[in-house]
Amino acid sequence: MIPLIVVFGPPATAWSTASKSSNIHGQSGTLQKMIVETGSVTMQVDLDRLNGSAATTGKLETVHFAVGANSFFSILVFNDLLRGAEQGSMALVPQYSPAAGVTAPGYSLPVPLHESIDQIVVEKLPSGEPFDLAVRDAKTGFTFFNIEGHEYDYDAKAHLLSITAGRLLISKEFANATGRPSNAGTVAGKISIGAAMQPIEIRQLVNGATKSVVMPPLNGAAGGETPQQVPGPDVIVGELPQVQQFGNDSVNHFVGLGVATTSCNNGAEPLHWFALPQTDHPVIPQNLYRMTGGTDNNQRFEQIGQSWLKHAFLALENDACNFGCDTSSCTTGSNLCPGCSDPYSASLNASQGGIGSRAWVNPFTGSYPSSANNHGGHSHTGTSHRVRVASSDLNPAQNPGATYFAEAQYITPHEYSWCQQHPRECNMFNNASYHQFSVTGSGDNYSFSAVGSTVRMRPAIVAWLNTGGSGSQLEPDPGNDGVWLMGYKVTNPTAGVWHYEYALYNENLDRAIQSFSVPLGFGANISNIGFHAPPQEPGWANDGTQNNQGYSSLPWNVIQNASSITWSTETFATNQNANAIRWGTLYNFRFDADQPPQAANATVGYFKTGSPSTVAIQAPVGTSTPTPTPSPTATATATPTATATSTVTPTATPTATPNPTSTPTATVTPTSTPRPTPSPHATPVPRPRPTLPPRPV
């Protein structure tokens, strides 16, 4: 049995004959397209809830169905490993049928469902939909239930597909039709599916992955326009369509989430996608953030969860970003071809056997060992390695008015190596995108609905900066290590009190951040000092941390004197597993003061290597003219090691956001002065670098 938790992406169209071409290098094996031959479906439903009974017993009634023979619910299987599915459906044949005169069990279904019982289907929805599966009327399209939280297993020897643990959520249509609109989105029961699959097309991949799914170049499309890709390979997160829960810890009250990602190659060159044990493919961390606090509920922006890394394999070559997928002169499968896209569902990104520790990866070079997702020596719980979030951070009753954002990033060694060889074609700093989601649920069970559109090529902190914050981007050692972002916001909640909120986001800086110091003016009185960091994974065997102990979650120490307030964690020399701000994480620092803000410089110390940097902020350093509601533009002042700074200024952009008014766009003015001070794992040969074009934040 090969277990795989997977929710599939957009439909495929055709199969390629490019495998006949010679000189193809890459993966070899068998790619099969399979449909349902026979199967069965079991629904356990809460009829009291569906029928609006006042005497709710919580008892679940079981309804059995057979799956219609040769239902065109198709999947893709590569070398006996479940890889993806196309949009389609499986017909459900009830074990009783009112139309056929077969006596129903001793309970009654709501009228709309009873009238459609002979024509309902389980449908695989397009990737852009909020849910992956739904129960619908095949003739009218009426949706009875959306399905979430389901897990997929595929038995390659028996050709058996199992879908288990799915939660049936009452659709808005069904809730309205039964006269109980408040039931929309509530859990009405469970669903499980077992199906025997049969191949309808088999493709042999010899000496390289062939065109398993063809999305031709955008020639002859409306207007005859062909998108212009940037030079070099350039993987971006094109879509973040789903967030789903796949497990929980009901003792410590955490949940385990997965974030669906669709990658797109915005570049003119194929991007390497060689599966493990080869070490030239992207890895995909996922994060969850919450914005809350203050009169407008946007005072604070905190990271409340992080996952390990999904290791990519077998690019499917779709065209979800509408860049014009061009598979000509490209080895498909083992490369993401120019303009093409590849979907990873929420559950595939949460599949515990396919995700490895962040500790193995250098985020700047993209390097990692072939054993980077070794799960030997440990067993998994419902939250292991997934986006682990405290239930209290999601509960709407405890977080009224909160706004949530999912973020994902693709880190790849190919972009780094290409950048070293082609310095004018560096596309390493636009790999993170975010999407807003709403949250419903309680206890240790939650559901997520997308709001607005994915904001591409921007980390999630930009959503906060767009609410009146300011920030800057620093690159401490250009050419040898990555970048981090300083965000801050100052508010005036009551007369004579100013709240200072700072957020430090490490995008792809391998050296990490160890300390943060804010200057104080003479006589400034500080109160309500705070610190926030996302929870860390516990230690696991083969997790890449020192002695497999995992990273510390201890809060940073804080020291205040007459001239400054400083937060810090242990040094690298003291504890290699200290709670430093590592790549892909955001930490918060805050306090209240009785003095208004003025321009100042904070000092940031690094964890592994490198001299401290100074960065422009606002702080209570003394003033002659109070300014209760500042919103200045920050201008970072670099130290000898921080040789490139930038200013983030919210300006209008055509990228769609949850707030349609504007999206921050970074204005970067780098001044490159390379220094041969690499991070411990980043070892490029120092060389002069030309001035690069502005990078978006």
Image (cartoon, helix red, strand yellow):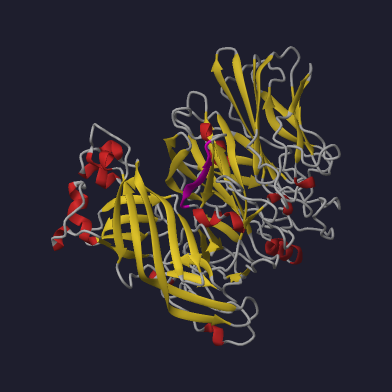
Q: Is residue 362 visible?
A: no
Is residue 362 within the magenta segment? no
**Span shown in magenta:** 241-250
Q: Quadrant of residue 327?
A: bottom right
Q: Where is residue 382 shown, x and y percent of the image?
A: 55, 46
Is residue 242 within the magenta segment? yes
Q: Which residue sits at x=60%, y=83%?
A: 206
Q: How many marks?
A: 0
Q: Is residue 239 above or below residue 84?
A: above
Q: Is residue 529 above or below residue 225?
A: above
Q: Magenta stretch: dominant SS?
A: strand
Q: Quadrant of residue 552?
A: top right
Q: Where is residue 13 shown, x and y percent of the image?
A: 41, 73
Asked whether, in this view, residue 359 is left or right of residue 146, the answer is right
Q: Where is residue 635 shown, x and y percent of the image?
A: 69, 36
Question: Looking at this view, is 393 or 530 the one in front?
Answer: 393
Q: Where is residue 398 shown, x and y percent of the image?
A: 48, 27
Question: Looking at this view, is 462 or 651 the one in front?
Answer: 462
Q: Is residue 179 visible?
A: yes
Q: Is residue 371 above or below residue 240?
A: below
Asked whether, in this view, residue 10 is left or right of residue 185, the answer is right
Q: Which residue sits at x=44%, y=39%?
A: 439
Asked whether, in this view, residue 519 is left or right of residue 492, the answer is right
